[in-house]
Amino acid sequence: MTAHDVALGLVAAGTVVIVLAAIGAVVAPGDVFTRLHFVTPVTSIGGPLVAAGLCVESGQPWVIAEVLVIALLLFVSGPVLEASAARAAAQDRGIETEEQPA
């Protein structure tokens, strides 16, 4: 098995996770809060898998560093953005009234 095969497998696995999460978000019954659960696998599983595949395929240190920084930012900011979107939706529906977290 070559590095290209490993990279292709990682990118394919990440892409499958992202596509399944997108399909799940579209077809999930319920409101915005239920659909927000499908965002997390994209940022915590799909993105890092694709980034790992790109790093294996590239093999160049600067490209690897750049891809890893982008993946880390996505991994760290994804849950924060999801929580912010849920809070904004709750405020829009009148569920949450305070501007700041309690």
Image (cartoon, helix red, strand yellow):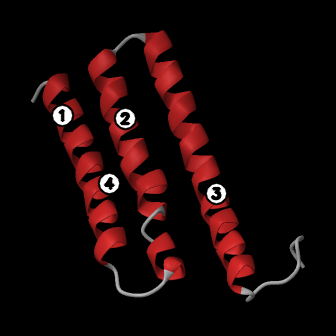
Specify the amino acid type for callout 3. Leu
**For the residue carrying disc 1, how many other residues have a C-alpha within 10 Å: few (<14), some (14-19), or many (20+)?**
some
- Disc 3, disc 2: CB below 8 Å? no
Q: Secondary structure at mark 4?
A: helix
Question: Which is closer to the viewer, label 4 or label 1?
Answer: 4
Specify the amino acid type for callout 1. Leu
**Where's residue 85, x and y in %?**
64, 65
Question: Which is closer to the viewer, label 3 or label 1?
Answer: 3
- Residue designated by label 4: 18
Separation of marks 2 and 4 at Cα, in angstroms: 15 Å
Specify the amino acid type for callout 2. Ala
Dot 2 or dot 4, earlier in sequence:
4
- Residue designated by label 1: 8
Separation of marks 3 and 2 at Cα, in angstroms: 23 Å
- Residue designated by label 2: 52
**Where's residue 14, x and y in %?**
30, 47
- Disc 2, disc 4: CB below 8 Å? no
* Number of numbered labels in the structure image: 4
Reply above or below: 31 against 22.
Answer: below
Q: Secondary structure at mark 3?
A: helix
> Is residue 95 found left or right of 19 in the rendered image?
right
Separation of marks 2 and 1 at Cα, in angstroms: 10 Å
Dot 4 or dot 1, earlier in sequence:
1
Give me the residue at 37% from left, 25% from top: 55
Q: Secondary structure at mark 1?
A: helix
**For the residue carrying disc 3, how many other residues have a C-alpha within 10 Å: few (<14), some (14-19), or many (20+)?**
some
**Where's residue 43, x and y in %?**
48, 52
Specify the amino acid type for callout 4. Ile
